[in-house]
Image (tube, rainbow, N blue to C red):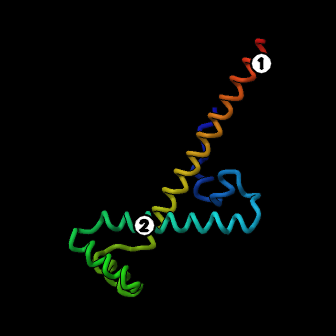
Amino acid sequence: MDIGPSVKDILEKDLLELIGAGGLAEDKKAEVYGKIVETIRYRTIEAIDRLLSLDEVDAFKAAIDKDDSDGIQKFLMGKGINVEDVMLEEAVKYKIEIASYVDYLNQAGKVANQSLNNQNSSQ
């Protein structure tokens, strides 16, 4: 039985290619990538939030509300938080989750089809 995507595939393949959707039209790919990036940004903010104290979270949110990219970077760097590293970690986690979920659905579909074929054969 297939145990899902390999570590090499997860690290090297594009997410859409990994889940078998590499053939999407370019406009659909752009739409999906936009949603992927948005999700990873939210996950990154949540991950950073977990690294900060309550007082630091308030300061972080204030910088976000001001849309002050430089202020946010300086604040986080002062706390020893590298946003690019956190974002990369969240992107890899997301990629693994999506690939695993799609693999699970594919495996479930195969089992369901096999069950239907067995039922049809016995009739």
Q: What secondary structure is found at the residue carrying circle 2?
A: helix
Seen in the picture, residue 3 relative to 83 is either above or below; the reply is above
Q: Residue 113: name its quadrant.
A: top right
Q: Nearer the viewer, mark 1 or mark 2?
A: 1
* Amino acid type at mark 1: Asn
Q: What secondary structure is found at the residue carrying circle 1?
A: helix
Image location (x, y in percent) of residue 47: 37, 63
Image location (x, y in percent) of residue 91: 51, 62
Q: How many marks?
A: 2
Q: Give the residue pinned by disc 1.
A: 120
Residue visible at 65% across and 60% down in the picture: 14
Going by the image, does 115 lie left or right of 101?
right
* Amino acid type at mark 2: Thr
Going by the image, does 99 lie left or right of 57?
right
Going by the image, does 119 lie left or right of 64?
right
Residues packed near mark 2 inside 10 Å, few (<14), some (14 to 19) or many (20 plus): many
Marks 1 and 2 sit apart, C-alpha to C-alpha, by: 49 Å
Instruction: For the C terminus, give its image quadrant.
Output: top right
Q: Give the residue pinned by disc 2.
A: 44
Instruction: For the N terminus, give its image quadrant.
Output: top right
Image location (x, y in percent) of residue 106: 65, 39
Going by the image, does 30 lie left or right of 99?
right
Residue visible at 52% across and 68% down in the picture: 38
Image location (x, y in percent) of residue 17: 69, 56
Seen in the picture, residue 84 relative to 92 is either above or below; the reply is below
First in sequence: mark 1 vs mark 2: 2
Residues packed near mark 1 inside 10 Å, few (<14), some (14 to 19) or many (20 plus): few
Between 94 and 3, the residue placed more toward the observer is: 94
